[in-house]
């Protein structure tokens, strides 16, 4: 039995949105996902898929994408990404009813893996625009957008704390925290997300969303403050899931 994670499948079986323009790593990426996940993940394993599942804008346009995910081996737990328009956070219970037992949606709830609670939410972080001079030095950023981002971070923190508290009330003391957005942006060393991970004594924080080699180092990777941070965006992993627990 093992716990795996990977995100950002960006599937588009029903809408015309090829990822090929984003580089060779994305060429036939759905075939890579199928091949590598099937090779690695066993039926008794768990795979947490950290958001940006489908390009469809409503559930009807995502049916084949979600079916593709359902057909992958193991128990699939899905997190919301910024592109997942089909998923209204407030209607997560309905998705869980509709797709049970093929898919499990992580939002305002938690799942378990052995004695670990798997908690999470989409998260949010300010992504610019940042302004640079001709030499590439950071000169400033859009402060209005930064203010707006703080509100979205606050809202996501309420959702995340709810997930932690539900797990804690159920008696769980070991946590793995999943986010779609990176926990910090290029201006930050810490954030409300790194703080809550410390507060609850998380062992790992897992996130995705960062695409392309120029963005892979946007946030924390490896050990920081005693917590392991993993970037698991599909293109970063060349679509091979990361094993989090044996
Ligand atoms: Fe993405
Ligand atoms: Fe994303």
Image: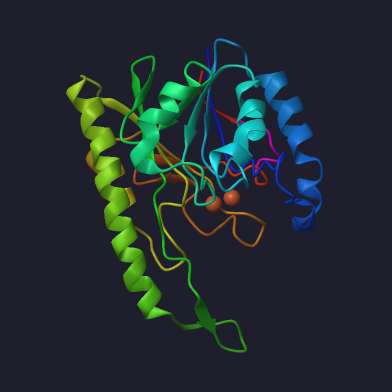
Left or right of 21? Residue 183 is left
Q: Is residue 21 magenta?
A: no
The total of numbered circles placed on residues is: 0
Q: Is residue 133 above or below residue 42?
A: below
Q: Can I make out residue 113 in this image?
A: yes
Q: Can I make out residue 192 in this image?
A: no
Taken as a whole, is the magenta stretch helix, strand or loop?
loop
Residue at 49% over, 15% down: 101
Q: Quadrant of residue 64?
A: top right
| Residue found at the far bottom of this picture | 134
| Residue found at the far front of this picture | 60
* Foreground pick, 191 / 123: 123
Residue 31 pos. (x, y %): 78, 33
Residue 22 pos. (x, y %): 74, 57
Residue at 64% over, 40% down: 9
Residue at 37% over, 23% down: 111
Residue 72 pos. (x, y %): 65, 22
Looking at the rendering, the stretch of residues picked out in magenta corresponds to 237-241
Left or right of 64? Residue 207 is left
* Foreground pick, 182 / 134: 182
Residue 114 pos. (x, y %): 38, 14
Q: Is residue 70 above or below residue 43?
A: below
Q: Is residue 240 magenta?
A: yes
Residue at 46% over, 51% down: 181
Say how the picture is coloured: rainbow
Q: Quadrant of residue 116?
A: top left
| Residue found at the far left of this picture | 169
* Foreground pick, 98 / 110: 98
* Foreground pick, 235 / 154: 154
Q: Quadrant of residue 150?
A: bottom left
């Amino acid at each position: 039995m093992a716990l795996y994670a990977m995100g950002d499948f960006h599937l588009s079986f029903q809408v015309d949105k090829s990822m090929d323009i984003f580089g060779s790593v994305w060429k036939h990426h759905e075939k890579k996902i199928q091949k590598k996940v099937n090779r690695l993940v066993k039926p008794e394993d768990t795979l947490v898929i950290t958001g940006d599942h489908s390009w469809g804008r409503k559930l009807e346009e995502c049916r084949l994408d979600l079916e593709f995910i359902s057909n992958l081996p193991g128990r699939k737990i899905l997190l919301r990404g910024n592109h997942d328009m089909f998923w209204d956070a407030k209607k997560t219970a309905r998705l869980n009813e509709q797709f049970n037992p093929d898919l499990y949606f992580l939002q305002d709830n938690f799942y378990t893996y052995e004695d670990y609670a798997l908690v999470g939410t989409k998260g949010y972080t300010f992504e610019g625009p940042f302004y640079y001079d001709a030499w590439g030095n950071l000169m400033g950023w859009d402060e209005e957008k930064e203010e707006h981002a703080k509100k979205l971070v606050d809202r996501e923190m309420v959702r995340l704390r709810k997930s932690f508290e539900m797990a804690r009330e159920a008696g769980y003391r070991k946590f793995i925290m999943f986010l779609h957005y990176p926990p910090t942006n290029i201006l930050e060393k810490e954030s409300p997300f790194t703080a809550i991970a410390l507060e609850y004594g998380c062992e790992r924080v897992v996130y995705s969303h960062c695409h392309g080699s120029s963005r892979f180092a946007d946030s924390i990777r490896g050990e920081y403050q005693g917590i392991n941070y993993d970037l698991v965006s599909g293109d970063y992993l060349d679509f091979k899931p990361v094993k989090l627990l044996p």
